[in-house]
Image (cartoon, rainbow, N blue to C red):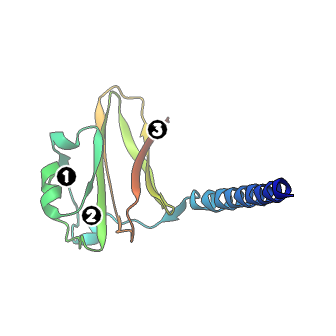
Amino acid sequence: MRTRIMKTAFQYFLCFSCLALFLSACSSSSDEELEEINFLKFTDFECEDPIWDAKSELSDTYRVVNSNEELDEYITINCIPQIDYSKYMLIIGEKSYSYGNTLYSQKVEENNNSIVYTVIVLRSFTTVATSVQYHAIIERPRKQKEIEVVLSYFEQ
């Protein structure tokens, strides 16, 4: 009798565990769906025609910037954007290529855990090595999120 009660209790425990695992898997799959969000550029912050050059610290990488002092570590720019860093954060980067290219499109997406900034580069037929500079200013998320920049290209 005692073993039968223990066996039944174990079966209930196993069923509830499987149900809990199934429900958590269902809820995490919806967390993974990315939703496109708006982003701003330097021109949205009182910089009419910004021209900027990356310093060596930004070469072939990206940074998340949280102040104008930090921004000054990574680029030189002809005007300082008036960004309220308590409301916004800046993702900025540069990628060097051994061929000609131009920035084609950009988008920013997020879910509960991450922010993904996608930069698409259009490769040209020129053999002149160039680099692509990119930046997006987004609203600061309420909670800490992983930030990822995805660079991809296609040929003309």
Q: Which residue is mark 2?
A: 42
Instruction: Please give the name of the residue rendered at 80% of the width and 56% of the height, measured from the top-left corner.
Output: 11
Q: Which residue is mark 3?
A: 153
Name the residue type under label 1.
Answer: Trp
* Helix, strand or loop under label 1: strand
Q: Is residue 63 visible?
A: yes
Name the residue type under label 3.
Answer: Tyr
Q: Residues within 10 Å of mark 2 (few under 14, many from 20)?
A: many
Which of pointers 2 and 3 lies earlier in the amino acid sequence? 2
In the picture, measured across the screen, residue 20 lies left or right of residue 49, that is right
Q: Position of residue 58 (x, y in %)?
A: 22, 43
Which of pointers 2 and 1 lies earlier in the amino acid sequence? 2
Q: Residues within 10 Å of mark 1 (few under 14, many from 20)?
A: few
Q: Position of residue 92 (x, y in %)?
A: 29, 52
Quarter containing the N terminus: bottom right
Q: Which residue is mark 1?
A: 52
Answer whether labels 1 and 3 touch (C-beta < 8 Å): no
Name the residue type under label 2.
Answer: Phe
Q: Position of residue 10 (x, y in %)?
A: 76, 55
Distance from label 1 to label 3 (Cα)? Answer: 22 Å
Q: Quadrant of residue 138?
A: bottom left
Answer whether labels 2 and 1 touch (C-beta < 8 Å): yes
Q: Quadrant of residue 88?
A: bottom left
* Helix, strand or loop under label 3: strand
Q: Is residue 98 above or below residue 63?
A: above
